[in-house]
Amino acid sequence: MSSESDGHAARRDFGAAPVEARWARSAQAWERAKAVLGGGVSTGLRASMRPHPLFFERGEGSRIWDVDGHSYLDYVLGWGPLILGHSHPSLVAAVGRQLRLGQTFGAGHRGEYEVAEQLCAAIPGAEKVLWSNTGSEANQIALRLARAATGRVRFIKFWGHYHGWSDSMLFGYRPSADGSLEGLASKGQHPGGLDDVILVPWNDLDAVRAALAAGSDSIAAIFAEPVLCNSGVIAPAPGFLDGLRKLCDSYGALLVFDEVITGFRVAYGGGSERYGVPADLVVLAKAIGAGLPLAAIAGRADLIDLTTKGVVHAGTHNGGPLVLAAASVTLTELARPGIYSTFEQRAARLVSGIRDSFERHGVLGAAHHVGPVVQVAPGIASVGSFSDYLCADWDWYDALTIQLLQRGVFNLPGGRWYISTAHTAEQIDETVEAFDDAVEATTNGVGLPQASPLRGARF
Ligand code: PMP
């Protein structure tokens, strides 16, 4: 993960100056925040927002309002969690009800097992659940379980996949300040982790096979986002996940799907349902809490039960009644008929509008989606690999996002868009129109996007 100043010394800062007055209150708030928060933000990634981190005061459904009084259609969705949009009435009611009954007991309650039952019913192969708070934490526990189950220490992960910020997993995600992908991703990170990770290219089954063959008796697990959402929304090649499953089985390693983004999003049962491949452990976060901090590890009972045989899994806030009240409602809402086919339709419409717009304005650019996760990448024809993704013109995209903000569309740096159940067909059409206008303004202002080899991406 890069901090704001990493990896983009030669960044072209298009377009921010003429629009500064538009976000005067946000700019002021950010100045105040910078005086008391590291980088003026609560997570380093938010510093990459353009023209600078904006400040918000309200959200409702698919809309969000900033402190300067502008409203936007929200495709950031809290960086993924808000799958039902902002403040869904059932969620507000359920959390309100629970809040009146007490916010935490530090002891057992009904939500813990009821929502675990919902997860086990939804996720292929899941028999038991552990509750946790964030995706970073939950991946740590999954790694610990895999090590305890196999008696092995090393693990395979793929270039460009993100499994949280912990010392043991933050490798091969983004180029560091010197432009290198190798080595430690963060200053202060324990160097010992480098000995335990084997990085291989996504969708390259031969590379996985070779890595397992070379280190067969030392590899505890393969970790993968079933769709490489964090670096280009790159779907698994046909047969790839199944290939991983079979290789894990023959080498006695565990298959861990990090479904922090894909879970309850690319299908109700996540990537393992969509691609028909069960993992041994599935890590969930973001959508399951619909905006409240909740994560889970769901999987084989014998693995989860290792927590009764010496594996430590702890956390003051694990499985709290408030977040589980939110999760229960969320999973119930997402189980309604037609949710996932509507996601596909909305995303397909957005993608075709974006492609048409690029074509109309002579912009080379890629747009595609998996479920309600859309990826846009200017300057390249398609995103087939992590290196394609890094080559896209993210400076140009920054200029585009500022134009989009001025037209009432809020989206993430790095080209990923999330669609919620609250986004209507009309709002997607509205967004496509705004996108077309924004592309025209961007090309008029800064020209066409240019691909460049391994640009230091910062998100
Ligand atoms: N895994 C994946 C696939 C993620 O996308 C993220 C967060 N973007 C994480 C893990 C880490 O989750 P958290 O931010 O909740 O720690």
Image: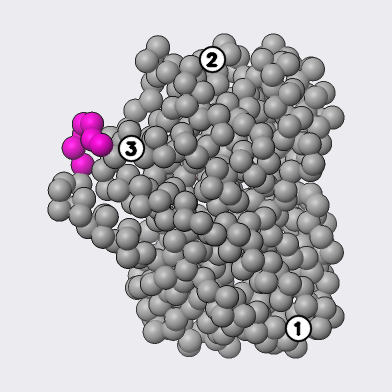
Choose the circle earlier in sequence order: 2 or 3.
3
Q: Is mark 3 on a helix, strand or loop?
A: helix
Q: Mark 2 Cα within 10 Å, few/some/many (few <14, many 20+)?
A: some
Q: Is residue 76 visible?
A: yes
Q: Position of residue 185 (x, y in %)?
A: 61, 42
Total numbered labels? 3
Q: What element carries label 1?
A: helix
Residue under label 1: 443
Q: Measure the alpha-carbon separation of dots 2 and 3.
A: 27 Å
Magenta stretch: helix, strand or loop mostly: loop
Residue under label 2: 149
Left or right of 167 on screen, residue 206: right
Residue under label 3: 114
Mark in the foreground, 1 or 2: 2
Mark in the foreground, 1 or 3: 3
Three-letter code, disc 3: Glu
Q: Look at 42% across and 70% down and name the residue there.
A: 61
Q: Is 451 situated above or below 29?
A: above
Three-letter code, disc 1: Thr
Which residue range is magenta in the image?
104-110
- Most foreground residue, 4 or 276: 276
Q: Is 337 situated above or below 103?
A: below
From the image, which quarter does the C terminus lie in?
bottom right
Q: Position of residue 16 (x, y in %)?
A: 59, 80
> Picture quarter containing residue 210?
top right
Q: Look at 67% across and 37% down and name the residue there.
A: 276
